[in-house]
Image: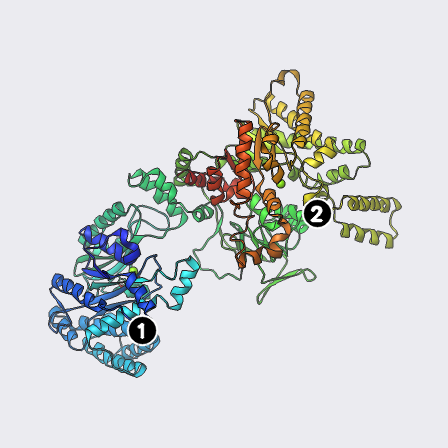
Amino acid sequence: LKRVYSFNEGKLGMKALLGGKGANLAEMTTLSLPIPPGFTVTTEACRAYFTSGGKLPEGLLGEIVIALHDVEEAQSAIFGDTERPLLVSVRSGSVTSMPGMMDTILNLGLNDETVRGLAEQTGNETFAYDCYRRFIQMFGEVVLGIESNHFDQLQEQSKQTHGRSSDQEVSAEEWKELIGHYKDLVAEQNGQPFPQDVYQQLQMAVEAVFRSWNNMRAKVYRKAYGIPDEQGTAVNIQAMVFGNLGNESGTGVLFTRNPSTGMNELYGEYMVNAQGEDVVAGIRTPNPIPQLLEEQPLVYGRLEELASLLERHYRDMQDIEFTIEKGNLYLLQTRSGKRTAQAAVKIAVDLVEEGIISKEEAIQRIEPSHMDQLLHRSIDVSTPLVAIAQGLPASPGAASGRIVFDADTAENWKKDGQKVILVSVETSPDDVHGIIAAEGVLTSRGGMTSHAAVVARGMGKPCICGCDTLRIDLDSRSVSIGTLTFQEGENISIDSTSGQVYQGSLLLNEPVITPELLKLLEIADEIRTLKVYTNADTPLDAAKAREFGAEGIGLCRTEHMFFSGQRLPIVQAMILAEDQEERVLHLNRLLQMQQSDFEAMFSAMDGLPMTIRLLDPPLHEFLPNLEQLQEQQRELELSGGHVEELQRLKRTISKVHDLREINPMLGLRGVRLGILFPEIYDMQVEAIFKAAEAALRRGVDVRPGIMIPLVGHSNELKQMRELVDEVAAQVLSEEFKWFKYRVGTMIEVPRAALLADSVAQYADFFSFGTNDLTQMTFGYSRDDAEGKFLGSYMEKNILETNPFQVLDQDGVGKLIEWAVIKGKEKKPFLETGICGEHGGDSESILFCHRSGLDYVSCSPYRVPFARIAAAQAAL
Ligand code: ADP
Ligand code: MG
Ligand code: MG
C-alpha cells in the first residue's frame, strides 16, 4: 500500500487521497510550474493513525525518508546536514478546504548545528537565526502545544531591551539570545529540551498535523460545513523557499481576479522580506500587488503569466500563495478563490466570453446564496458592525427605520413620511397593512413559515422572525434586546439575509441588475425549459416582476385587493349583509374597484398570461376579531352609548359568531364560497371581463386565466366553469365575443390530485398550490405546526426539512407527478405549474422540471433566482 506520493506522481483527481493542497501541488508540478519539490502523505495514513489509537502506521517513516531523498537530490541539500541542510515545511491539507483551521510548520530541519550551516551557505547569519527562532516558536506551539503568548512575551522583552521596533532591525546576536530563551521556555513547559534530532522533529510534526484534524476549531468548522469527520487530513512535506532572504524576497497572496468585484485584474498583497505566516499575523502592513510591478517588474510579469496560465488550466479564478526568494518566484498553493456574489456572476460571464468555460458551466457555478445576496438590499459593511441580536433570516434583504409596535402606527407613521420597522411578537392577517407600510419586519416568535415570514417573502420585504432575545413591552412602548432598551420611534436596522439586528439607522446598498447579471440571466433563458411566472397582486409588483423577466403571472390573489384600508369596510359590510340583495349592493361597489385593479394589471402584463384566483380565504379573515368586538360592546354599554350603534355591534358579533369555525382552513373557503355565495365569484368574474374588454379597446393584449381555488371534486369546477362562461357571455359585448380566456384550478386538495383526470375535463390548467397541498397531505396545520411540533420532528429526525419550505418530493411530490400524468392523459395541452412558496426554492424547482411541469411561479423578487435555478435544473 502506497502512502507517500511525490508531487510528480499525484494529480488533481486524487484529492480524496492527497487532500486539496497536495493534489493541487502535484497538478502544478506536472505543469512544470515553479513548485518547491516535495511529497504528500495520504489521508489514508491519517485514518490509519487514528484507528490504531494514535500510532504512525508501520513502515510509514521509511517511506517518508525515501521520498525525502528525492527532495534532497533536487535541492542539492541534505536533511540534517551541517553544511548544506535541507529545510522543509510540514503542511496540513484536508480534502475540503478548511482555511486556517489546521496547522503548518515551517523551517523544519533546523537545530543548533544545521543553523550554522544555513548561515554559512547563505552568507546571511541574521536570516538563518531568524528562521531558527521562527521554527522553535511554530514547533513549540503546534507540536508541543505551548501557548503563543509565552513566545510573544519573550520576543517583546528582547526587542524592548535592544530598542527594536520591527523584525527587520533585529541582529543575528539578538536572535541567538532570544533562541536561548525560547529553548529554556520549551524545556520548562515541555519537561524536555527542544528536539535536536531532525528526524524526530519530522516525525513529531507529521503526527501533530494528523492530530490537528481533531482540534476544536477544525471540528467546529467541519460540523458547520457538513464535512465528514472520517475524511482525515493529508500531510505535505515540501522543500522550503525563503521569502525572508532580504529585500528581493517576500511572500504574498494573489487572486487572479478581484474577489469582491470580479474585475479581471490581479488582486492581493505581498510583504517584502517575510515568511508566509507574517502576512496573516499582521505584524506589518502588506503592500498591494500592483506595487510589485514597480519594485520587481520581472517578477510581476511572471506572476501575471502564471496567474493566467493557472486560470486557464483550472478554468476558474484562483487564490494563489507565492514566495519570492531573491527574485525567483515560487508557487506554494492554488485553489478556487472565494468571492462575493457580484464577483461570482461577473467572473462566470467573463470566463464564458473569454472562451474558458461553457455557458452551461457558468450557470452551474452560481450558488443559490449568490442570487439571494444580489437581488436584495444589503447593509453597507465598509465599516465593521456588531449585531445586537440574531433571529431567523425569514425573508432576505436589509432595512433601516424607526421601531413601531403595531400595524396602525406603522401605517400612520409611514403616511407622515417616516420609515418604520414593524417589531412585534408575531403577526396575523390583521397586520398586513402594517407589513405593507413597514420597511421590514422583526418578530420575536414564529419560524420560517410563520405568518410574518410568508407575507414578507411574498412582498419581497425584509423579515427576521423568531428573534427570541427580544422583549417587547407594550405598556411602556419599548423593546429590550439584551441590555439595550429601545423606545418606539428609535432607529434599528435589520439584515434579514443573515438574520442580524443592529442598533441605529445604517447605510443600505441598493440591489442592482448589473450588465453581467443580465447576461447570465440571458444565458439561463437559453438553457431552461421551465417557464417562470410570478405571483403578483398589484400592478407595481407585476411591473417589477416583468423587469426581472417574469413571463406571466401564475397567481394573482384577489383577496389582497380586499384588504386595503378603504375597501375593508365595504368587504365587511358585504359579508355582514342580511340578505343576498344587500350583499349584491356592496358587491357592486367592490366591482368597480376590482375592475380598475384588473385593468391596471392587464396593462402591466400586456401580451403575457395572467392567472387570477377568485376569492380564497374564509370570510372571517376579513372581520374584526370577536374578543375585540366584545370589548367594544362592554365599553359602549358602560358609557351608555347609542342604542343603534350597540345594535349594529351586536349584529356584527352574532355574525362573527356564525362564521366562526373550528377548523377554518378546512372550512368554508375557496370554491366552497363560490358555490354557496355565487354572487361573490360572479362579481369577480364580471370585473375581470369588463376590465379585459376595456383594456382590449385600448389595444392591450389581454390573456387571462381564471383560477378556482381549493377544488376537491370535479363537480365543483364544472359548476364554476359554467358560471364563468355565463358571465362572459353576459358581459362581453358582441364585438369581443371571440375573446379567449382560460379556466383552471388550483390543485391543493389531495382528492383533486388523485382524480386529476376527472378534474381536467373542466380545466385548461392546473396550478399546484403546494402550501395547502402540503398542509392537507401531511395533515399539518400550517399556522400551528411550526410553533408546536415541526421543530421537534426535525430534531428527532422524523423530518429532514420543513416541508413548507422544501417540497416533500416523496409524498406531496408523488401527488403532483400523478396529477400531471393523469391530467395530461385527459388533456394533452393542459398547462401545469406550481405557485406555492416552493416556486422560489431551487430544489423544488429541480423537482418541477423533472416532473414535467410547464412553469413555476414565485414572488417578483425570486424571478431571477428561479430563472437561474430552472436553467440549472435543465443541465
Ligand atoms: P494554510 O493552509 O493555513 O494556508 P499552508 O500550509 O498553506 O497553511 O502554509 C502557511 C504559510 O506558509 C503559507 O503562507 C505558505 O505559503 C507558507 N509556506 C508553506 N510551505 C512553504 C514552503 N515550503 N516554503 C515557503 N513558504 C511556505
Ligand atoms: Mg495556505
Ligand atoms: Mg391555497
Front-lying residue, 706 or 254: 706
Q: Count up the numbered dots.
A: 2
Q: Earlier in the sequence, mark 2 or mark 1?
A: 1
3 in relation to 547, above or below:
below
Residue wearing tag 1? 141
Question: In the rendered image, which quarter contains the C terminus?
Answer: top left
Dot 2: within a 10 Å radius of its alpha carbon, few (fewer than 14), some, or many (20 or more) residues? few
Q: Position of residue 215 (x, y in %)?
A: 37, 68
Q: Secondary structure at mark 2?
A: loop
Q: Secondary structure at mark 1?
A: helix
Residue wearing tag 2? 663
What residue is shown at x 27% (from left), y 58% (from top)? 18
Q: Quadrant of residue 670?
A: top right
Query: Can residue 746 be seen from the camera position used here?
Result: yes
Query: Can residue 134 be seen from the camera position used here?
Result: no
Q: Position of residue 777 (x, y in %)?
A: 60, 45
Q: Quadrant of residue 383?
A: bottom left
Q: Is residue 498 left or right of residue 524?
A: right
Q: Is residue 685 left or right of residue 39?
A: right
Amino acid residing under circle 1:
Glu
